[in-house]
Image: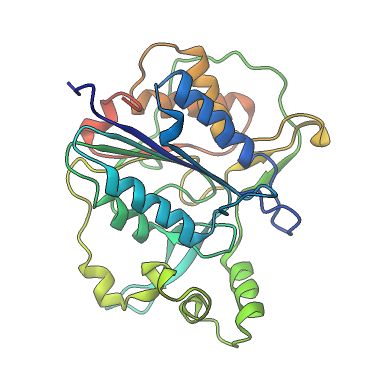
């Protein structure tokens, strides 16, 4: 049982990419809504919730470096028994990488900060590995290709473990205008190339040129060093992803922008929490969110990646 001195810390990141070809509409709304849920339902101190958005006038933009700095700061404060929470709403992508001794490509999941300085599954593994034993670190990623975003974490609900929930939510109108929260890596390469003016298909070259030592570990380390980074410790890290790694997540802009925009997965989580006031396990939250999205007609399947113990532990408790 946690004592009264344990802390609840949160980092909420929403990227709308306004006035760009990749513009979304609901991501900032998602994290503003979750901030209120954290305070009113889960007892988070507003002063311990760090909000990063790319809204006009934001003093600290959600760049790759700023997001990782904020994550590092949150983890550095953590002690056994603390509850850490990271909610991301924005674009995701998958980037090719080569894993020795083979020469074929695999795809690695990543989120896309407002400056395109990707934060990859390897970065999240490295961050989560630093969380003190006895603390919990929950990541909710409302982005495309977010399944497996914590590298090597165990699948509890996902492509090979489909499950159903008996929860039937109370839904209002079904939205009609959607946009996928994905940027193909080819588009990322084209954008980075336009900035570096370097003619190469090698992503690492562009990331290192533009971002230096704030670039992802995936691009900074040689492949053999990446493999030497340890796997997740036992009982470390809880990922609630908006979809499977090969799927996209939806950004909703109801009624042509006249209604309040939102991310489909973030909204599903809010519906689940609103209509179930009692404590819910991580597994129950994801199964119920899957059901909400299914009823709404979305072809995306939220996933849960964590240890067996954390699958049945209470969400944000």
Q: What percent of the width, then of the height, locates residue 255? A: 81, 31
| Residue positioned 41% across, 56% down in the render | 69
Nearer-the-camera pick, 59 or 315: 59
Tell me if residue 232 comes above or below residue 163 in the rendering: below
User: Is residue 285 at all visible to an observer of this figure?
Assistant: yes
For this view, does 257 lie left or right of residue 300? right
| Residue positioned 20% across, 60% down in the render | 230
| Residue positioned 50% across, 27% down in the render | 269
Tell me if residue 19 comes above or below residue 314 in the rendering: below
| Residue positioned 55% across, 81% down in the render | 201
Quadrant where the C terminus sits is top left
Nearer-the-camera pick, 45 or 115: 45
Residue farthest along the bottom direction in this orientation = 199
Quadrant where the N terminus sits is top left
Tell me if residue 46 comes above or below residue 203 in the rendering: above
Q: What percent of the width, then of the height, locates residue 77? A: 28, 44
């Amino acid at each position: 049982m946690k004592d009264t001195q344990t802390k609840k810390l949160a980092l909420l990141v929403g990227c709308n990419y306004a006035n760009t070809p990749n513009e979304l509409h609901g991501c900032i709304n998602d994290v503003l809504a979750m901030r209120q849920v954290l305070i009113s339902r889960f007892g988070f101190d507003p002063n311990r919730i760090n909000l990063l958005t790319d809204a006009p006038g934001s003093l600290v933009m959600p760049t790759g470096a700023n997001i990782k700095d904020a994550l590092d700061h949150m983890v550095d404060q953590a002690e056994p028994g603390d509850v850490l929470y990271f909610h991301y709403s924005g674009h995701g992508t998958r980037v090719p990488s080569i894993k020795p001794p083979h020469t074929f490509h695999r795809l690695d999941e990543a989120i896309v900060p407002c400056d395109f300085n990707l934060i990859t599954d390897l970065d999240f593994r490295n961050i989560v590995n630093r969380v003190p034993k006895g603390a919990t670190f929950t990541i909710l990623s409302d982005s495309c290709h977010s399944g497996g975003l914590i590298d090597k974490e165990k699948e509890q609900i996902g492509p090979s473990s489909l499950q159903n929930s008996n929860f039937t939510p109370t839904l209002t109108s079904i939205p009609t205008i959607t946009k996928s929260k994905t940027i193909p890596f080819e588009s990322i390469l084209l954008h980075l190339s336009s900035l570096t003016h370097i003619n190469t298909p090698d992503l690492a070259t562009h990331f290192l040129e533009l971002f230096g030592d704030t670039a992802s570990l995936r691009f900074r380390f040689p492949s053999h060093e990446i493999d030497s980074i340890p796997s997740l410790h036992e009982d470390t890290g809880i990922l609630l992803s908006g979809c499977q790694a090969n799927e996209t997540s939806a950004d909703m802009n109801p009624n042509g922008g006249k209604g309040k925009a939102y991310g489909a997965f973030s909204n599903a989580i809010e519906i689940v929490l609103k209509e179930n006031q009692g404590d819910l396990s991580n597994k129950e939250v994801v199964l119920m969110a899957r059901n909400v999205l299914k009823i709404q007609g979305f072809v995306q399947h939220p996933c849960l990646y964590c240890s067996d113990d954390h699958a049945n532990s209470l969400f944000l408790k």
